[in-house]
Image (cartoon, rainbow, N blue to C red):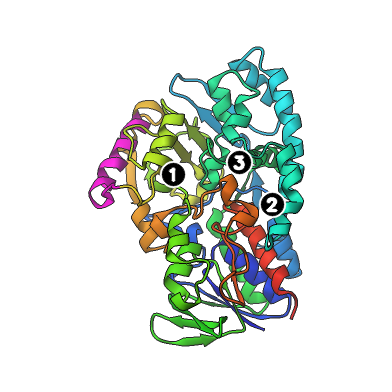
Amino acid sequence: MKILVIGSGFGGLSAAIRLQAQGHSVTIVEKLDKIGGRAYVFEQDGFKFDAGPTIITAPWLIDELFELGGKQTSDYVELRKLDPFYNIRWEDGSVFHYNDDKERLRSEILKFDPDGLPGYERFAKELEDIYKVGFDLIDQPFLSVWDMVKVLPQMMRLRSDRSVYGFSARYFKDERLKQAFSFHPLLIGGNPFTATSIYAMIHELEQKFGVWFAMGGTGALVSSLGELFTEIGGEILLNSEVAKIITDSGRAKGLMLTDGSVMKADAVVSNSDIASTYLDLVPGEDRKKYTDRKINGMNYSMSLFVAYFGTDRKYEDIAHHEILMGPRYRELLNDIFNAKTLADDFSLYLHRPTATDPSLAPDGCDCWYVLSPVPHLGGDTDWASEAEFYKHKIYKYLEERYLPDLRKHLVTDLHIDPIYFRNTLNSYLGSAFSVEPTLLQSAWLRPHNRSEDVDDLYFVGAGTHPGAGLPGVMSSGRIVADLIGHA
């Protein structure tokens, strides 16, 4: 079969490699000048900035792709395990150093609550059950209501109706520990107060398999996967934006690009945002379920404001990954997800990859990005006028609390905001993670990997099952490859 893949994010690359290895003729059609999608790389003044994902878990999913080409991951890129995985810092000066050393993890808990270990032991035991159920579902398609019915008893037994925060709060008394063991859904676009407790399994995933970094940055991993794909016969077209999916009698038959050229295919796999794919690429007469009303009625994840910057000095006391908790937790998340207002305060993710790989910056310099969750464009923030002010507000905050004299040492910077996600990444409402991971938007209730409106149209990436995050989007590639089957 001739298969066209729209977009070259991790979901698209995963599907494309698997399908090419299965004997199909696969072409990736990418809008931008480099592959990667959300995992694009910005290069400026000698600094390399990974635009998006920086936390690698479930490394065997990466290994599987290279093995399909008869290779090993180490032939292309080095994955290095981090320690700590990340630090979690609060404004009172307390710091939780987080890794998979069980004894150290327990000692960190005792710093915050001398009576906290029994609660953690119960938390970890229940999490093992959640992980066993949740991770078994990550690469299984949910195409029928019966697929959902089969797992409902287990989900009910595990109280999947609870939120991740609600699950965490049962076992910890100290509010900081509740936050430390519940923030993980934010890594995949979810609100800890509404994301189903199934997503608490991210903690167990990290404990079992670690947190890793690709030397050279996530972009080096993307480039390696692209190289593997072309080595096994795949084709990549860059600077090629799709205008519409060509259909005939309700079947996907190819693509029309914005330059008017037509590419024929037996099947189409979209790694583009699922809402934008339906709204902008699928002909309206073919959309029976995913109508404008249906798409507008779904809940979408927050967006992000990300500033990328370089400093001409190194801050050695800052780890590779830092989670900086602001003064409010529940209230801030309510502002972001529900009120959709840009708050005066923020919680931040600070990324310093030069803590692990100095080659990403000139000698003696540090490479950074700082990420702030913000409302998607369903709110009324005017980012054209707000972005610069917001960026410098973040710099001031970092300087006062974590990075002394930061602005004196800034040598380069750039930023992205919700407008970038909408205009450059074609993400509906400028959402950074597509469809929000809530209980009522999970598994069968999430947009399916095989289109319900157009035959021979498939979906990978954050907006479909199983969801955002590298394990999720790469597993969506496996699901689609299994659905299409060998040539």
Image: 463 above or below 85: below
Label 2 – label 3 distance at C-alpha: 24 Å
N-term mark: 1 or 3:
3
Label 2 – label 1 distance at C-alpha: 24 Å
User: What label sits on residue 368 in the rendered view?
Assistant: 1
Residue drawn at 45 percent across, 83 percent down: 256
Residue reaching furthest to the top = 114
Is 393 left, or right, of 244 in this rendering? left
Q: Please name the amino acid that badge 2 sits on.
A: Pro
Q: Secondary structure at mark 3?
A: loop
User: What label sits on residue 59 in the rendered view?
Assistant: 2
User: What label sits on residue 440 in the rendered view?
Assistant: none
Asked if residue 393 is among those painted magenta in the image, a careful observer would answer yes
Image: 230 above or below 100: below
Q: Give x and y (percent) for residue 257.
A: 43, 81
Residue drawn at 40 percent across, 86 percent down: 260
Nearer to us: label 2 or label 3: 3
Q: Please name the amino acid that badge 3 sits on.
A: Thr
Q: Give x and y (percent) for residue 409.
A: 33, 38
Label 1 – label 3 distance at C-alpha: 32 Å
Q: Please name the amino acid that badge 1 sits on.
A: Trp
Q: Residues within 10 Å of mark 1 (few under 14, many from 20)?
A: many
Closer-to-camera residue (475/250): 250
Nearer to us: label 2 or label 1: 2
Q: Secondary structure at mark 2?
A: loop
Q: How many marks can you see? A: 3
Asked if residue 475 is among those painted magenta in the image, a careful observer would answer no
Q: Give x and y (percent) for residue 242.
A: 45, 76
Query: Which segment is the magenta one?
Result: 380-399
